[in-house]
Amino acid sequence: MNRISVHVDGTTYEDEVEPRLLLVHYLRDRLGLTATSSGCDTGNCGACTVDLDGASVKSCSVLAVQADGGEVTTVQGLARDGEWHPLQRSFHEHHALQCGYCTPGMIMAARDLLRHNPEPGPEEVRRALKGNLCRCTGYQNIVKAVLAAAAGQKAPAEPATRGDEACT
Ligand code: FES
Ligand code: FES
């Protein structure tokens, strides 16, 4: 067992973990932060995306011991004073989710994009989210939601569309 200390969503946790424990399982099973999804555990779907020390990572591709001493932000750490993060609000307003399984990872990947590129175009959004799979939405409304959040304004209300352009 290895002793680790990790700061997650504003709280420091000290734990003994097996060296093989994946960060996604540490977050979900040990810390109870189950909003971060675990989809494939092979680095393919992006559902487990979190921020580790300022970089977007797939938490199934990182060992918990690698996060020792680090700072992790999950989708659960984005809201402030009961207010959703602009991306959370925009996903809600633009019907950018259906089952919601991919949503935590999508939002975390989009957050990473907007930190590095605050004014992306649609193709840049698609490129940035290409490592995040969604089996429900067709991606159209996800792209709209990210663009609207980037614009910092509410886009005109539109009916949810089941688009056919994938960003993969
Ligand atoms: S669960 Fe991590 S990429 Fe799918
Ligand atoms: S909303 Fe269901 S997988 Fe994306």
Image: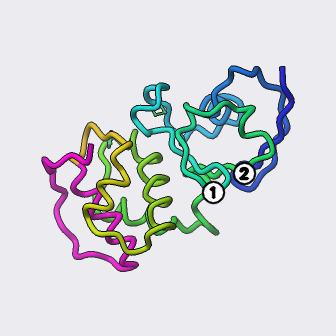
Residue at 27% of width from left, 75% of height from top? 155
Dot 2 and dot 1 residues touching (CB under 8 Å): yes
Residue type of the residue flagged with mark 2: Glu
Quarter occupied by the N terminus: top right
Horizontal side, residue 29 vs residue 142: left or right: right
Percent of width and height locating residue 128: 37, 54
Q: Which residues are magenta?
A: 139-168
Residue at 55% of width from left, 68% of height from top? 83
Q: Nearer the viewer, residue 60 or 83?
A: 60
Could you classify mark 1 by the number of other residues whose Cα lies within 10 Å: few (under 14), some (14-19), or many (20 or more)? few
Percent of width and height locating residue 119: 38, 74
Residue at 30% of width from left, 41% of height from top? 134
From the image, tell me which residue sits under label 2: 71
Residue 92, quarter of the rendered image? bottom left
Structural distance between the alpha carbons of marks 2 and 1 = 8 Å
Percent of width and height locating residue 45: 39, 35
Element carrying mark 1:
loop
Horizontal side, residue 107 vs residue 162: left or right: right
Which callout, 2 or 1, points at the residue further toward the start of the chain? 1
From the image, tell me which residue sits under label 1: 54
